Image (spheres, helix red, strand yellow):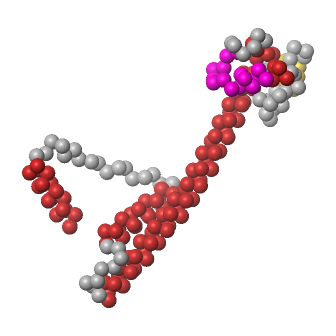
Amino acid sequence: MRGYAGLGPVDYNLAEPWRQQPFDTAQSYAVFQDFLALKAPRRTRGLHPSAEGWRVAHGWDVRAAAYDAHIAAIRVAAVERVTEALAERHARLGFEVTTIAERDLARLRRAQEKAPDDLPRLQDGQILRYLETGIRIEREAAGAAPPAPAETLDLSALSVDELRTFRELARKAARK
């Protein structure tokens, strides 16, 4: 990239144009750093009497755009690192939860074979919740979309008797 510093064409540091360039004086570069600290769209008003001239002559707009892209890339990389770490953690936790559920399911089977009336540590519903949770975590960690949230019913308009009937029907349905 070529720029103009008032004396003739000057080479930019293409890799990091937001860094001090050969044509930047200490004062113009200090003002450029203040310019970079502004939110886009950046304006030179209030920075320094020579800021607008330096902006044009030293290509501040292009350099600031490169800086913004650099910062955005850093942020994206940080989010990707965190997302990857969370996915690994969730996959590990999902595996651990399903391992616990499998162990307790095997314990339940053995206990039922030996003494059907004895209760093992986890009940069937608890084991099912472990399995469902572990499977959901494993799927999400593998990149699958989480399931849609279950619909909720608005029961606020029901009378007390209707609520009792609803609860009884829900209990019966849960037993089946």
101 to 55, vertically: above or below: below
Does the magenta segment cover residue 32?
A: yes
Image quadrant where one finds the C terminus: bottom left
Image quadrant where one finds the N terminus: top right
Q: Where residue 163 appears, x then y in whole percent? A: 14, 51
Tell me, yes or no, if residue 3 can be seen here: no
Q: Where residue 14 appears, x then y in whole percent? A: 81, 32
Q: Where residue 156 appears, x then y in whole percent? A: 18, 43
Does the magenta segment cover residue 126?
A: no
* Residue found at x 72% / y 31%: 67
Between 79 and 3, the one nearer to me in the picture: 79
Q: Is residue 42 left or right of residue 158?
A: right
* Residue found at x 44% / y 72%: 100
Report the magenta residues as a range. 30-44
Tell me, yes or no, if residue 40 can be seen here: yes
Q: Is residue 105 left or right of residue 15?
A: left
Quadrant in the picture for residue 34: top right
138 to 77, vertically: above or below: below
Q: Where residue 39 appears, x then y in whole percent? A: 63, 24
* Residue found at x 31% / y 72%: 124
